[in-house]
Amino acid sequence: IYDLSFSDGAPSDSLEAAKNASNTEKLTDQVMQNPQVLAALQERLDNVSHTPSSYIETLPKAVKRRINALKQLQRREFITGDVEPTDAESEWHSENEEEDKLAGDMKNKAVIAEKEAAAAEEPNPKGIPEFWFTIFRNVDMLSELVQEYDEPILKHLQDIKVKFSDPGQPMSFVLEFHFEPNDYFTNSVLTKTYKMKSEPDKADPFSFEGPEIVDCDGCTIDWKKGKNVTVKTIKKKQKHKGRGTVRTITKQVPNDSFFNFFSPLRGEPGRGRNGGDEDSEFTLASDFEIGHFFRERIVPRAVLYFTGEAIEDDDNFEEGEEGEEEELEGDEEAEDDDDAEINPKKEPSQPSECKQQ
């Protein structure tokens, strides 16, 4: 019998390492056979593969060309394909332009000719397909509102415009959602009007922080028969009290949908026409926030939300804000410490001449 232990009774390093490796392999095999683990891994892979930048990389060159043109001049016609951008309009200087140029100069002419031939066979869809739908999918605030049955409708969305009230009129703005002809409703444009308060409250003028949204109006959607996604039909059984007979009735009830956005609650939070309950206040506040987000960020920078660049900027900005808050809190604590050194929190001693005998 061979003694495989040290004189102090501890196992050898090599034996311990071999056991650990064997146990690790067995544990890995067991984990990878767990369907829940595999599903979680697949979900993570799906999320990686559906990032905005990876989606842009899969688009044909002709579509990428139109995206570049949009970055310089945001035109609806580039999105719908009614107008093709010129070479000058579609020229976009990337951060790695010098490296790209050097790499391009080193390419063999035969390879370039081969790529041109392949590009000629590449699909060339009209405009930028599903431009606005992709923005809805990329932006968390919007994607949370969209149900699966909303998606086919939003693929028909061609443009979103902001129109401001004329000078001298009560301050407001209108969001216009332009749709191509579709199988769901007859409207070509759906609107949402946001009314704003632009003057200080006479009772508390110093609390005024600038114009704010105080109310909003939607529009009537002319749904085609059986296509209204904002309601669903349910069946309910009713029993007659006297005869005991049972009948089945059908009724329509509200259904979650992005298109409820065009049938908003009315009134200012806290003073609403719906009684000002907490749920109504929260819904109104969320609606106002979405309207502001469309006006200030989505519409002016649509192409960057399509590519995902604006989303990265927003994330970086939020991280910066958090860092500033932490730094400020640290400064405040330091000031408190300084104050404590100068004015320690203790009972002040009486001057010597005032001491009691």
Image (spheres, rainbow, N blue to C red):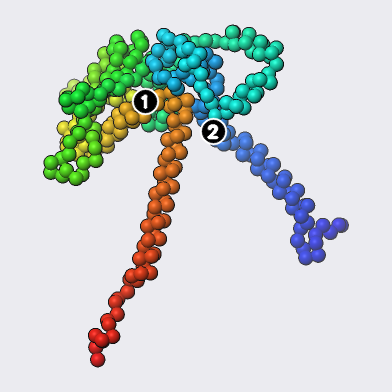
Q: Amino acid at mark 1?
A: Pro
**Residue at the disc numbered 1:** 300
Single out the residue that lies furthest toward the bottom: 357
> Which residue is painted at 72% across and 46% down in the image?
21
Q: Amino acid at mark 2?
A: Arg
> Can residue 39 be spotted in the picture?
no
Q: CA distance from mark 1 to mark 2?
A: 32 Å
Residue 137 locus on image (x, y percent)? 43, 26
Element class at badge 2: helix
Q: Earlier in the sequence, mark 1 or mark 2?
A: 2
Q: Up-down: is 350 above or below 294?
A: below
Q: Up-down: is 114 above or below 47?
A: above
> Which residue is painted at 59% across and 11% down in the image?
119
Q: Which part of the image, by quadrant, shows the C terminus? A: bottom left
Q: Which part of the image, by quadrant, shows the N terminus? A: bottom right
In front: 299, or 151? 299
**Residue at the disc numbered 2:** 44
281 relative to 56 in the view: left or right: left
14 relative to 185 in the view: left or right: right
Residue 28 locus on image (x, y percent)? 65, 40
Element class at badge 1: loop
Residue 2 locus on image (x, y percent)? 86, 57
Residue 60 locus on image (x, y percent)? 54, 15
Where, by quadrant of the figure, is residue 98 drawn?
top right
> Which residue is painted at 34% across and 14% down in the image?
179
